[in-house]
Image (spheres, rainbow, N blue to C red):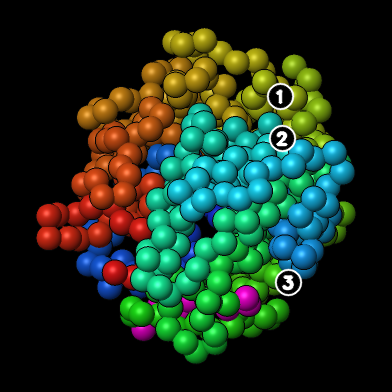
Amino acid sequence: MLARGLSRRRWSELLGVALIPVFSSCAFFLDFDELQKNEGVDASAGSGGGTGALGGGGATGGVGGTSSVGGSTTGGSGGGGTSGVGGAAGSDAGPAAIPLTELGQKLADAVCTGLEACMGPAIELVTLGEDCHAVFGALLEDRYVAAIALSVAAGAITYDPVLGAACVQGLLNDAQQTPPACVDFNATVESCKSALGSLAAANEACSSVVECGDGLRCDLSAGCPGICRPYALLDESCTNDGMCDPRNGLYCRPSVDDAGVQSGTCAAFLPVGAACAGQAKCEPGSMCLGDQCRVLVDMFTARLGFSCSYTAGASLCEPGLSCEFAGFAFGAATCIAEKAPGDACKFALPDSCPASHYCSVNIFSTGGQCLALPTENQNCAGAAMQAAGFAPQCASGLACVNGLCQTRRRLGEQCATTEQCYSGLCATSGSGNRCAPLACP
């Protein structure tokens, strides 16, 4: 890591959740590792692939705010506050009601609107060539809405289509503010519980976080069913962001002791303008650059041919340009135009190769060429850009499964690994492994 360069951690913040693909983990939803053990899941994962995470750890570029019916707020230091339904001036009124079958795509559209507003051109580093609305629509439908539907069918909770529409409209209102209200995705999930009824109280049983009441999470560490427990508060211990209270703008700041054991403590996001270092995270919509938290969308000003070296006060490249490093990543860099298929290329952010292509550069930023992304049943790409998490391993719609590019799967379809499922869970069933909702069986 270069002292004055942009470290990989900084870009990890920009992508959210340390570059974990959006298909592989959602700690804010439930304890995924425990669910895997209880389901007998094939927990082996392809190395990367897919899109980047959706601000899930409360890092930079979270979705465009949260809101609750009646105007109750969440988000703590989440930048710009929140709005009640209809609270943003100039925003169009949405549907009066959203049936559960349409909720996933409507939420995806609102989430992507927020990402576009809060991240600007950096959204390309999140989606990695995927269509935001399509990929998050599939993810939200299979991962969250399906779990809600299971709980509703079991009589555990209820869903109100009017309050569901209010949640979606609140997200759109916040994204359309000037400047947009940018809040951690965990706070968004917590806020949108307003559309659910008959939620469990503290110490009551739960099958997923959608079944626990306000301020509670579903703890599955002891198996299924889980127990609704209060979120951890400031300075309390944690192992993932989903354990910390999102209503107070908290995330899990990791630490490693002398024995190499990783743990964490719930911490508050740093405000814009604050000094930043180590594992501290800036509030959503900002990132740590030059050891200071800066508003993300204000930094894309460097023009073609100008420096983008990421020292204090430096700028990122204008939309449509890539920041190409002269040698090893995160050293001196220059804004360049997009390359053509077959062109020589170096390590750059975002990738300077055209859509459906990647740079085959090695870790020394040499020997790169813009090659077509592998298609189904071809070997996954494994160049330096993929190893660092900055480029997909396969063409759009494919996941890297045991070294080969395979089609992503929807609920009920056969799967080999969790990476392949939009739901994030490949569960063992009587007819083999199939993609399942993130919920107890």
Quadrant of res 73: bottom right
The reply to whether residue 278 is in sight is no
The residue that appears at 60% across and 40% down in the rendered structure is 109
**Helix, strand, or loop for circle 2?**
helix
Dividing the image into 4 quarters, which one contains the C terminus? bottom left
Instruction: Give the labeled residue for mark 2.
Output: 120
Q: Is residue 380 left or right of 265 when viewed as pictured?
A: left
Q: Amino acid at mark 1?
A: Pro
Answer with mark 2 or mark 3, whichever residue precedes in sequence. 2
The magenta stretch is 214-222
The extreme bottom residue here reads 203
How far from the left and from the top, in percent, is residue 404? 25, 36
Of residue 409 and residue 315, the one placed in the foreground of this image is: 409
Q: Work out whether 116 lies above or below 100.
A: above
Q: CA distance from mark 1 to mark 2?
A: 8 Å
Q: Please report contact status of discs 1 and 2: CB closer than 8 Å, yes or no.
A: yes
Reading the image, the residue beneath label 1 is 319
Tell me if label 1 and label 3 are in contact, CB under 8 Å: no
The amino acid at mark 2 is: Gly
